[in-house]
Amino acid sequence: MNKKRIFKKLKNGKDIDFYHKVNDHKVYTVRLSYNKDLFTLHTYYLDGDDVFDESNYKDEKLVTYSDFDILIKTLQESFPGIEIRI
């Protein structure tokens, strides 16, 4: 994971979206973004076929961080072995 490239992309206003497979039934969607001096980590997995049904979005979390290193540390602790390729 190239933290420097991730930081630059976020600071330039680009979101980073990727997926992390936990098991055969759970694939998390992970979105990293930056806005107004805060980094945002948004995660969830979809349990169902209808993306328009909000009850299908499980374990949804939306957390903001003022420190980029804490964002990355939290991401690595929440999703061991995660690899972000940009």
Image: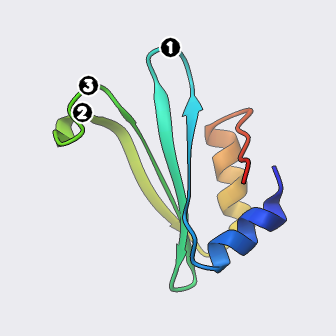
The reply to whether callout 2 and callout 3 are in contact (CB within 8 Å) is yes
Residue drawn at the location 74% of the way across and 74% of the way down: 8
**Compared to 66, does 76 lie above or below?**
above
Q: Earlier in the sequence, mark 3 or mark 1?
A: 1
User: Mark 3 highlights which residue?
Assistant: 48
Amino acid identity at mark 2: Asn
Q: Whole-percent x and y of residue 31?
A: 51, 54
Q: How is the image coloured?
A: rainbow
Q: Whole-percent x and y of residue 85?
A: 73, 48
Number of other residues with Cα within 10 Å of mark 2, as a class: few under 14, some 14 to 19, many 20 or more: some
User: Mark 2 highlights which residue?
Assistant: 56
Q: Earlier in the sequence, mark 1 or mark 2?
A: 1
Residue drawn at the location 57% of the way across and 71% of the way down: 14
Quarter where residue 86 is shown: bottom right
Quarter where residue 77 is shown: top right
Residue drawn at the location 65% of the way across and 78% of the way down: 11
Amino acid identity at mark 1: Asp
